[in-house]
Amino acid sequence: MPSPVDLTPSLSARLSAAILARPVSDADLQAAALFTLDAVANIVAGRNSGPGRKLLSWQNMMSTGSGGPVDKARLSFLYGSLCHILEVDDLHRASVVHPGCIVVPAVFAMAAGSNGRSALTAILRGFEACCRVGMSVGPEHYRIWHNTATCGPFGSAMAVASLLQLDEASCVNALGNAGSQSSGLWQFLDTGAETKHLHAGRGAEAGVVAATLAKHGFTGAPEILEGDRGFYRATCPNPDERLLLPAEEEQWQLQATSIKPWPSCRHTHPAIECALELHRQLPEGTAIKSVRVFAYPAALDLCDREAVETAYAGKFSLQHCVATALINGVVEFDSFEAAARTEARHLRSRTAVSAVEPFQSAYPVHWGSRVEVELENASVIAHQVADARGDPELPLSHHDLVAKARGLLVHGGHPAPDQLIDQVLAMSATGNVPDLSGLLVTLDHGFD
């Protein structure tokens, strides 16, 4: 007698159905436009960086003699890589995924000139997919795997599937093939290698390839997540499938995403928040004897780094971020350059970091920190936060978001920043998707 047919839908089928069925309001689209603006500004600003110039020079070399435009998969790779370079793109805490640098590049590569509302709907759905997968992988996955790279392809695939109006079966094919392209390891941190930018680029590109192939009937594994040789079994010691599917009353995960105010790893931001407040409290002329930073284990795993030989290493150093914030009262792009690293060296060496409660238990729902500064006169000042600026609990204002975007666009040498800002924000009403491809030109030097 034949075995009964298993009619239980796969996890990716259930995820696709849940995302496609969710209603989208005007408020959702307006929120998506702001996150899109943040990602677009990061793409443009990423041009004005060492890795950005290398990427654009590489693209110029690869396309010499072709005489045609960059294909959409390659375009999504370039946009995604550029978006993640300056470490000031968005971050979804519960999944530890940077969704904007994966999803927005894929949509902008595919949809330039098309309807803005459809594109923003696709972005909402893409955020949902990669954040949901990221929440489900469990905390141990993050110790070896970079969640943005591994979970991101599910988001870019879902977003492009939405743009292409794929049915649920085709969405499952897209997610199946996206999941088989998931990769991205933290090993680059040991030397400060530039590999992390490829994680975002490949994550965006993988989804474009997976969804456009699905449009042509190219099949993917339906049980790519839960299968015996699937994503969870390969990379997740403790996955929690319950976190994969949204409840009806839950908001879109885009609404639970944080936007960074400072250009460093998000794990450093709660401590930066504390250090900036303590800088304001420091008595004039009083020397600092020592600093103690209290956080949670994931922050130490990635950002416990006293010696910082490069700007990128500084962005992943709690010691450096806190020291430069205490010394200067600001954290900006120049805070990680050679002069600032030298200036902060002695205070970095006197900064201790440790993981303690209540921050350990609150993570990953809340990313908090406490900084204590002991002065030479033996007095101690301290500040503690449960969340950082830019988190949903402490959101940046509309004015601050636009100001951040304008600063990034100016940094990236955009010829008309305000015009591009208006175009992106108009996508939630009657505007179309701006075309960024004309910005992919090789830069020989930085802008003033």
Image (tube, rainbow, N blue to C red):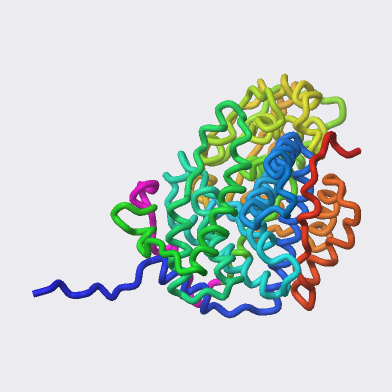
Residue at left offset 60%, top offset 48%: 200
Q: Residue at x 44, y 47 (%)?
A: 139
- Going by the image, does 12 lie left or right of 292? left
Relative depth, front residue between 207 and 403: 207
Give, as a single range, the part of the protein colored magenta. Answer: 232-250
Whether residue 366 sits left or right of residue 54 in the image: it is left
Residue 250 against residue 82 in the figure, above or below: below
**Residue 441, horizontal then vertical, whole percent:** 80, 45
Q: In the rendered view, would you say 168 is above or below 181? A: below
Above or below 100: residue 413 = above
Residue found 75% across the figure and 25% down from its top = 341
User: Is residue 142 visible to the viewer in this orientation of the structure?
Assistant: yes
Residue at horizontal 38 percent and vertical 58 percent from the top: 225
Q: Main secondary structure of the magenta part?
A: loop
Q: Quadrant of the N terminus?
A: bottom left
Is 233 contained in the magenta span? yes
Q: Quadrant of residue 256?
A: bottom right
Q: Nearer the viewer, residue 396 or 182?
A: 182
